[in-house]
Image: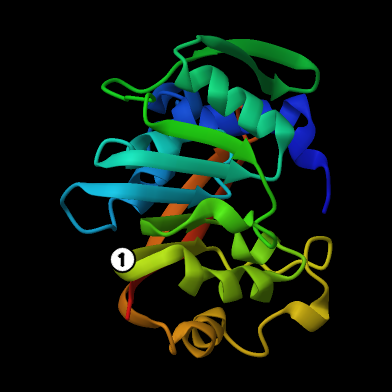
Amino acid sequence: MPDVYETDRYVGEYLLFHYGKSKEILPWEGGPTGALDFPVRTVAHFSEGRVSRSLDVGCAVGRSSLELARSSDEVVGIDFSNAFIEAAERVRVGEKLTCQRLEEASELSEVEISAPEGAHGGGVVFEVGDAMSLRDDLGCFDRVHAANLVCRLPEPGRFLERLPHLVRTGGELVLATPCTWLEEFTSRENWPEGRTLDWLKKELAGDFELIEVADEPFLIRETARKFQWTVSMVTKWKRR
């Protein structure tokens, strides 16, 4: 798997993506403001109510894990990147981080990052792990969240095969993916043969009921004038 997610550049971009204020990310009037706060909006697809345990696979720098903690007694956030998990843990314990934001050419500015208001990190545990080979003793969860993960895995089928063992009966699964299959992450032989949604239905139908399909845009700032605007497909499932 590419190690770009261990670089300071990507850590800074994702800290801004997860925790940056609207104007720090998108200062331009008329910009796609509806694409902000993506890590919050994907978690909002779970049903209302409090649960015991939640799992956030591919948690990056941890915003969705902290959002899950607002209605979960225990949250486990897992990511393959050591640098992402280190940053997530520092935010969780209340540190204020400073990340560099590329303006243009070699000009940088600094942005202060901290946990969102009202976040409670006491029940959150972050750890480094491989979504295709999660540790055996994770147990079962009421909610499993995986945003923009499956199309970045070398063998996504291995992750999908594990999901029935992670979500308890009656529990919920939220998968978000922009369906941007790239050979630098996933060899073509492991891509879906057709549309990603049809592939997910085929792989998950035996153990999960599809409840909802929705579109959620997201925005990643690269420079002051260049942004990634992408639309992720969000599917919500209930464990049979």
Residue 26 can be seen, yes or no: no
Q: Is residue 172 left or right of residue 31?
A: left
Label 1 neighbour load within 10 Å: few <14, some 14-19, many 20+: many
Q: Position of residue 170 (x, y in %)?
A: 27, 71
Looking at the rendered structure, the number of numbered marks drawn on it comes to 1
Most extreme residue toward the front, as rendered?
137
Q: Position of residue 228 (x, y in %)?
A: 59, 47
Per the image, label 1 sits on a secondary structure element best described as strand
Please give the name of the residue rendered at 49% of the width and 33% of the height, measured from the top-left corner. Answer: 125
Which of 197 and 80 lies nearest the eye of the viewer? 80
Residue 100 can be seen, yes or no: yes
Q: In this view, does 146 lie above or below 90?
A: below
Q: In which quarter of the image is residue 178?
A: bottom right
Please give the name of the residue rendered at 62% of the width and 68% of the height, measured from the top-left corner. Answer: 159
Q: Is residue 69 left or right of residue 187?
A: left
Please give the name of the residue rendered at 47% of the width and 16% of the height, measured from the top-left corner. Answer: 93
Please give the name of the residue rendered at 80% of the width and 40% of the height, measured from the top-left corner. Answer: 4
Q: Quadrant of the N terminus?
A: bottom right
Q: Quadrant of the C terminus?
A: bottom left
Q: Position of residue 114 (x, y in %)?
A: 45, 16
Q: Is residue 7 left or right of residue 66?
A: right
Which of 24 and 139 lies nearest the eye of the viewer? 139
Q: How is the image coloured?
A: rainbow
Badge 1 amino acid: Gly
Q: Is residue 2 left or right of residue 61?
A: right
Q: Position of residue 127 (x, y in %)?
A: 61, 37
Which residue position holds label 1?
A: 171
Q: In which quarter of the image is residue 173?
A: bottom left
